[in-house]
Amino acid sequence: MNLDAITIRDIARELKLSVSTVSKALRDSYEISEKTKKLVSAYAEEHNYRPNPIAQSLKKGHSKSIGIVVSSIDNQFYSQVINGIESVAYEEGYNIFITQTHELFDLELKNVNHLTHRSIDGLLISLSAETRDVEHLKSLHKKGLPIVFFDRVSDEINTHKVTVDNYKGAYEATMHLLQAGYQRIAHITSPAQLSITGGRLNGYKQAITDYGLPLNESYIHYCMHGGKDFPEIEQAVDALLAMEQRPDAIFTASDRITTSVLSLLHKKNIAIPQQVALLGFTNTLLGEVLNPSLSCVVQPAFEIGKQAMELLISLIKSKYPVTQFETRVLPTSLFERNSSRRN
């Protein structure tokens, strides 16, 4: 993305006109002749000129609009986060624009580009599974666009972030499985570069180590599309079930992966938890009524959205440059149900 491919100053310099004349011509001002308007418009179109959205917003005042970037709104976690965002946004008189990346970096890039050209006042974003390079966000941050990360965050940009204690949530979940008598615990997780992956993986590993068991790296599988690609999850499950010493429990690290693994175990006629227990991160509202009822680590999604929006509004309303930022880490909750209970 190149938001500054060409500016009004560039057009003025090339056409040997004043910046004021170019600006007025682009706004179709009556003060400018039709000949000059056509000249400026043709040059702007030929060179893909687009107004600087941040500069426009600053000039006009706040647009009272917020951009949101998530992987998918049909994910229970993100839909609950959005509810939290809305609870604050509408109270403060802000409209929101929601976009989905479907775990694709290119789509994240396009969505951010689209949102910023709507002159949004700020951006709330959870990175896609493919995102490794955050230069598109660094560029906007340097220009003064308020940005707050939630859930999947980047350490490369100094701004407010809201996430959960992924390490502790994973540690407690794995320890629950160990204390229930499971000793061969597999872990199916998201891409290694995501911020949430490291915390959950390390919590899982530390629990096994603290319990005095050897860590079997072959029990760890990464889903590079963050659970969006069902065949990818099925491949991981098949590989685990084909092992000579197959796992007696699976700890999963995201909403999509957890519910997909539950579905796959049923499809393969694997008795849960008699043959393989299951416990995972998921905010599904159906955990209690599934068969068996699903043990899960639940994130305070509504509160994440609420706090992220509050922090973004504080940035937008600040009369002075903000140099001190918060990383808020909220606790998770472990719900022990039948999918991980020994008979």
Image (tube, rainbow, N blue to C red):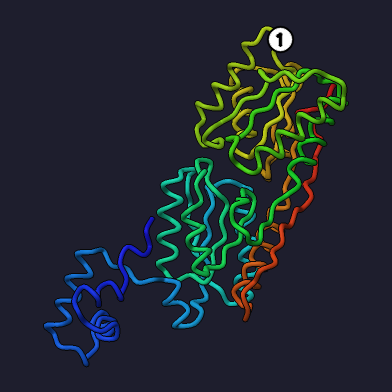
How many neighbours does mark 1 have within 10 angstroms: few (below 14), some (14-19), or many (20 or more)? few
Q: Residue at x 56, y 73 (%)?
A: 94
* Quadrant of the image occupied by residue 181: top right
Residue at x-position 63% and y-position 32%: 189
Residue at x 70%, y 33% (from the top left corner) = 201
Nearest the camera: 215 or 283?
Answer: 215
- Left or right: where 281 falls relative to 60: right
Q: Residue furthest left?
A: 35
* Residue drawn at 15 percent across, 76 percent down: 39
- Kindly identify which residue carries mark 1: 245
Q: Say above or below: 309 vs 243.
A: below
> Residue 287 lies in what quarter of the image?
top right
Residue at the farthest bottom position:
31
Point out the image quarter for the N terminus: bottom left
The quarter of the picture where residue 80 lies is bottom right
Q: Considering only vertical position in the picture, is 238 above or below 340? A: above
Look at the numbered disc 1 and give the secondary structure of its residue: loop
Residue 247, image x and y in percent? Answer: 72, 17
Compare residues 149 and 133 and report the one nearer the observer.
133
Q: Position of residue 14 (x, y in %)?
A: 21, 73
Q: Is residue 81 left or right of residue 113?
A: right
How far across and how far down the image is residue 229, in percent? 50, 32
The amino acid at mark 1 is Gln
Above or below, 109 against 42 in this view is above
Viewer-closest of 230 and 203: 203
